[in-house]
Image (tube, rainbow, N blue to C red):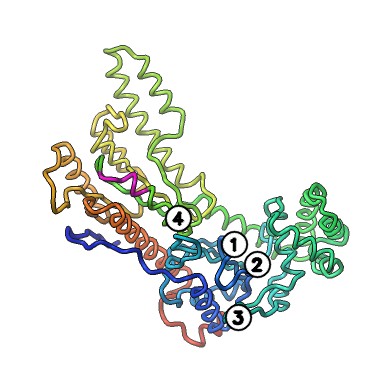
């Protein structure tokens, strides 16, 4: 059973939480990885280290068997909290709160690349890249980077062979490396693609002809698939199946969605709070979005048009029926949004819920019977955290209007019956209330992620002995 939380009336104002500078986090993480016996190999965008991170995240390359040790190292960094984890077959994305990598930022994404592959088929060996990696120092921080040839190949193929596009910010450097090390590049790619496809690609890159480079994509994919299946048919087939199974889980499973619903009557500042929250929560998930409780399907629009054309007597009857139809459409739409329409780990912030159909039906134009709204609300997907902004918790001021008082009492009764909820004082200054809501969301994400990591990595929170760490590296 998840914990129920209710905040007291006299809760003090929260100040902006302390965060680590990116340089401090980078130093602590590289030391922790070394302590686990790993060689922290940064794939790219390390030119501005230690003070500046050129990319939006940081990419480490590790062996697949080293992922438990890398996660243990990340969790050991003091002053940060892991608030999100998303596993793809080729990369594990970790979202860490408590880091200021950009002005005003509080969270940061760390990616552990487990393979350099397309559809589960490797185009470059991870072991070969790690063995050829070169030491680099930035200030007092020591880490490794791929060899110039490997870095150029990764910078090109990560976007080209997977997404069919060229990342222009990397292309000038890739072009120079290919021109200076043509034979080495061909030799590195030869086993996976064959002489013809590799030579065509390398010469097109050196010539800078984007059209020819894009024309190479299909042949590269075909050659990689055929050579992989011919050389290692069982392993390659299993890798393809594992890839699609992993991608399907991320894209079509509700387990990769964390939903927060913020409730409150009109005038409690809910819209402002949500607008202020979105920038603060960036990088606490791959996608942070506002989710509106409304139908995107055509049935609701048809129902509204039918209502507008109805006459007085028939309008009451059709209004009730169309309201019930809209409630069903909303129900279907909410469940569909749990499985489709997302591509990665998503944090959704909702400013209303199905319960509003019961508490404030006029807000949604619902004219149907209350028993039907109560029945439909039982089947809506439940958010992971309910936050109620309660204006009645003010210590000063006059009484609330009767309608608002009735609504807030209904909200309280509903929220207190939820598994995980928090009731906050909406009478506080907007900045302090935003910090309260932010802290509640981060706590929820951290607890949820901790449970996920325990299931996946067999109690990562316990002390890992030397024998276990040696075993995970073997």
Tell me the distance, in whole angstroms, between the alpha carbons under discs 3 and 2.
Answer: 15 Å
On the picture, is 255 further left or further right than 118? left
Q: Is 300 drawn above or below residue 21 in the view shown?
A: above
Number of the front mark, 4 or 3: 3
Image x and y of residue 102, in percent: 50, 62
Say what secondary structure mark 2 lies in: loop
Q: Which residues are magenta?
A: 268-274
Image x and y of residue 15, in percent: 31, 64
Tell me, yes or no, whether the highlighted magenta stretch contains residue 200. no
The tag earlier along the polypeptide, 4 or 1, is 1
Residue at 24 percent across and 29 percent down: it is 369
Q: Which residue is mark 2?
A: 44
On the picture, is 433 further left or further right than 301? left
Number of the front mark, 4 or 1: 1
Which sits in the foreground, 174 or 161?
174
Q: Which residue is mark 3?
A: 142
Circle number at residue 216: none
Q: Which residue is mark 4?
A: 255
The tag earlier along the polypeptide, 2 or 4, is 2
Category of crowding for the residue at label 3, using alpha-carbon neighbours closer than 10 angstroms: few (below 14), some (14–19), many (at least 20): some
Category of crowding for the residue at label 4, using alpha-carbon neighbours closer than 10 angstroms: few (below 14), some (14–19), many (at least 20): some
The tag earlier along the polypeptide, 1 or 3, is 1
């Amino acid at each position: 059973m998840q914990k129920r939380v209710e905040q007291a009336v006299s809760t003090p104002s929260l100040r902006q939480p302390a965060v680590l500078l990116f340089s401090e986090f980078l130093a602590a993480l590289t030391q922790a990885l070394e302590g686990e016996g790993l060689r922290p190999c940064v794939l790219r965008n390390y030119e501005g280290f230690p003070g500046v991170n050129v990319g939006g995240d940081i990419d480490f390359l590790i062996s697949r068997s080293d992922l438990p040790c890398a996660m243990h190292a990340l969790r050991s960094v003091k002053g940060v909290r892991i608030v999100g984890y998303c596993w793809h077959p080729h990369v594990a994305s970790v979202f860490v709160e408590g880091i200021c990598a950009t002005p005003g930022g509080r969270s940061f994404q760390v990616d552990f690349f487990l393979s350099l592959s397309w559809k589960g088929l490797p185009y470059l060996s991870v072991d070969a890249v790690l063995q050829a990696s070169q030491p680099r120092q930035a200030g007092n921080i020591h880490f490794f980077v791929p060899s110039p040839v490997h870095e150029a190949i990764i910078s090109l193929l990560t976007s080209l062979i997977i997404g069919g596009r060229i990342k222009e910010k990397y292309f000038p450097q890739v072009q120079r490396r290919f021109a200076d090390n043509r034979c080495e590049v061909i030799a590195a790619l030869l086993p996976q693609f064959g002489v013809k496809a590799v030579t065509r690609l390398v010469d097109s890159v050196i010539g800078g002809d984007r059209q020819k480079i894009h024309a190479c994509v299909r042949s590269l994919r075909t050659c990689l698939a055929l050579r992989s299946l011919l050389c290692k048919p069982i392993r390659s087939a299993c890798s393809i199946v594992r890839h699609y199974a992993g991608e399907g889980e991320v894209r079509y499973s509700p387990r990769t969605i964390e939903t927060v619903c913020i409730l409150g009557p009109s005038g409690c500042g809910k819209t402002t709070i949500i607008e202020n929250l979105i920038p603060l929560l960036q990088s606490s998930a791959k996608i942070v979005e506002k989710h509106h409780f409304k139908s995107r399907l055509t049935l609701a629009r048809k129902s509204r048009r039918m209502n507008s054309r109805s006459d007085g007597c028939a309008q009451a009857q059709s209004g009730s029926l169309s309201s019930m139809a809209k409630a069903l459409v909303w129900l279907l739409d909410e469940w569909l949004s749990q499985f489709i329409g997302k591509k990665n780990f998503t944090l959704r912030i909702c400013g209303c819920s199905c319960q509003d159909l019961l508490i404030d039906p006029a807000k949604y134009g619902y004219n149907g019977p209350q028993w039907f709204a109560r029945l439909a609300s039982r089947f809506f997907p439940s958010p992971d955290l309910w936050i109620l902004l309660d204006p009645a918790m003010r210590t000063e001021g006059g009484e609330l209007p009767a309608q608002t008082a009735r609504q807030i009492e209904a909200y309280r009764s509903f929220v207190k019956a939820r598994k995980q909820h928090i009731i906050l004082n909406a009478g506080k200054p907007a900045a302090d209330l935003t910090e309260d809501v932010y802290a509640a969301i981060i706590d929820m994400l951290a607890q949820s992620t901790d449970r996920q990591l325990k299931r996946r990595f067999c109690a990562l929170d316990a002390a890992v002995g030397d024998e276990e760490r040696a075993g995970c590296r073997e």
